[in-house]
Image (cartoon, grey):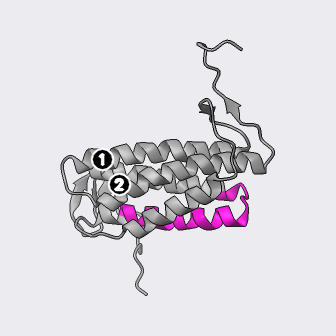
Amino acid sequence: MAYRLSRIVTRSGDTGTTRLGDGTPTVKESLRIEAIGTLDEVNSLIGLVIAYGVPPAIGEYLHLAQQSLFNVGGELSLPGRELVHDTEVRVLEAQLSKINQDLPPLKEFLLPGGSPASAACHVARAVCRRAERRVWCLSREERINPASLRYLNRLSDLLFVTARVLSQADGGEEVLWRNPGKQA
């Protein structure tokens, strides 16, 4: 197998440009690079959630999500390639249904928090929503794989429910938003 990153320091970024996976030079502030960077943030945050020590079943599907997120970034780095398919979206939906079934229904909004793993998962969810917005911005200018957009939307939902599951598993308490319009 050939090395993909034989040199980490290239100095090409010193001028405000980078290269896509196909070699195309691109300015660092482009919508495409912003979207790729935000996907990297989500992936890193999911790694942080896993590092907190989650149950094996959760770690397994979060690792799969990391792989698919890398594929979404790969699509953006190699314009015209489609690496994510509706199969991955359906896998997320099935996992979401499975883990959500034992949770009590929410009657108010939930404040991010709970256990450390749960709180980190809420941060990953929020950044996933930002990544989705960035990819949608890019899609207004260029064709983006619709399955990737659906994937990001479902992933943020899965991260929200996973945060709830982790909070319960770690004995953390879910803090509900107190609606000032309602009387206690």
Task: Find disc 1 in the rendering and name its residue.
Answer: 136
Question: Which secondary structure, mark 1?
Answer: helix
Location of residue 74 in the rendering, given as x and y in whole percent from the top left corner: 35, 66
Residue interval drawn in magenta: 50-73
Residue beneath the point at 42% across and 80% down: 3
Mark 2–mark 1 CB contact (< 8 Å): yes
Q: Position of residue 92 (x, y in %)?
A: 51, 61
Which residue is under mark 2?
149
Q: Amino acid at mark 1?
A: Trp
Report the front residue among 96 and 31: 96
Which residue occupies the extreme left position in the image? 141
In the image, taking residue 172 as reference, residue 131 lies left or right, namely: left
> Is 156 left, or right, of 144 in this rendering?
right
- Which structural element holds mark 2? helix
Between 137 and 1, the one nearer to me in the picture: 137
Query: In the image as oriented, which residue stretches furthest toward the bottom?
Result: 1
Instruction: Tell me the residue at 27%/70% (across/down).
Output: 81
Q: Is residue 28 in the magenta section? A: no
Q: Marks 2/1: CA distance?
A: 7 Å
Q: As shown in the figure, which amino acid type bears the numbered disc 2?
A: Leu
Q: Does the stretch in magenta take in 51?
A: yes
> Is 179 in front, or is 79?
179
Quadrant of the frame with the N terminus: bottom left
Q: Classify 10 Å Cα crowding around label 2: few (below 14), some (14-19), many (20 and above).
A: many
Sequence order check: which comes first, mark 2 or mark 1?
A: 1
